[in-house]
Amino acid sequence: MQWQWENATAGAVAGFTTVAALHPLDVVRTRFQVNDGRYTQLPYYKNTAHALFSIGRAEGLKGLYAGFYPAVLGSSLSWGLYFFFYSRAKHRYQKGTEEHLGPGLHLASAAEAGALVCLFTNPVWLVKTRLQIQTPGSGARQPYSGFLDALRTILRDEGWRAFYKGLGPSLLLVSHGAIQFTTYEEARKFVITLRNKQRKDDNIVGDKALTSVDYAALGALSKFFAALLTYPYQVIRARVQQRPNTDGLPKYRDSYHAFKETLRFEGIRGLYKGIGPNLLKNVPASSITFLVYESVLRFLN
């Protein structure tokens, strides 16, 4: 059996590169997402630039890179597993046929990969969220000293089930990856077909391979489209994953409660809090990810 290790390696390298370059924007996005002005009290930020400046001034580089270790671990693991499971699913659906996979099977492959990744990585993302919104003087609870301390404290105080808070929205966010990968695959096929048709019309022999700029543009386009459609799930997940109050009660009982309360007190805009830094981070991040992925994959092959 061919295990597609090249896909997993390329995905992991791409994920690490992305996180290392753009993590401060992820911190800003998470703080915007959870700051509802009611249950969570965080410093007031006017916009992304003000947030970056304020965090850097008040908390230093440590604040801008809060939750960096679980972010690197989670992203590298997620992208590695995602590309691995995705390529395996496509290989399975492709078996026995010479035809190219259509949008439906690309969607099914991406959804299957995303669901499996969620089960493996939800505890890591929960810890990342809590570390990112942990600010000096933000509460009476003893702050986590780091990733391992957070894991131990959560297991001791809340039990193993706490690691799967926000799993519902995470599974719904599988649609994000499915939409992104399907858009990427279909757009890539369209561009290749268009380029080759143009070369044929110009009587140029041979197929035209995509360039690094093409991969970067396709990655950005697919991420932008997927983000607009699925962003509210990210807001709900971040709010559900917050640390309980000092009395041990969660700020939101479950995902439905978080959705209802957000819509009730903040309206539709509340479901899109942090969309600015999210796009600033993830659109170029997706360009970097797919560019590195395709480059590493070509090198390994």
Image (cartoon, helix red, strand yellow):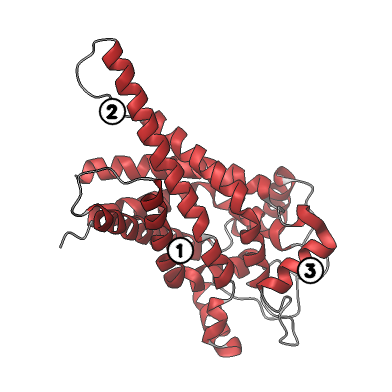
Is residue 225 in view from this perspective? yes
Q: Residue furthest top?
A: 202
Q: Which residue is mark 3?
A: 261
Mark 3 and mark 1: Cα distance apart in space: 29 Å
- What residue appears at the point 69 percent right and 52 percent down from the top-left corner? 274
Disc on the earlier residue, 3 or 1: 1
Q: Which residue is mark 1?
A: 74
Classify residue 5 as left or right of residue 24.
Answer: left
x, y percentage for residue 44?
A: 80, 56
Identity of the amino acid at label 2?
Ala
Q: Secondary structure at mark 1?
A: helix
Nearer to us in this view, 171 or 137? 171
* Element type where label 3 sits in the image: helix
Quadrant (top left, top right, bottom left, bottom right) of the N terminus = bottom left
Of 141 and 244, the residue lying toward us: 244
The structure residue drawn at horizontal position 66% and vertical position 57%, both measured from the top left corner, is: 232
- From mark 2 to mark 3, how far is it between C-alphas? 50 Å
Residues tagged 3 and 1 counted as in contact (Cβ below 8 A): no
Front label number (2 vs 1) = 2
Residue ranking furthest to the left:
1
Residue 2 rendering spot, x and y as whole percentages:
17, 59
Please name which of the two marks, 3 or 1, marks the residue nearer to the observer.
3
Q: Which residue is mark 2?
A: 209
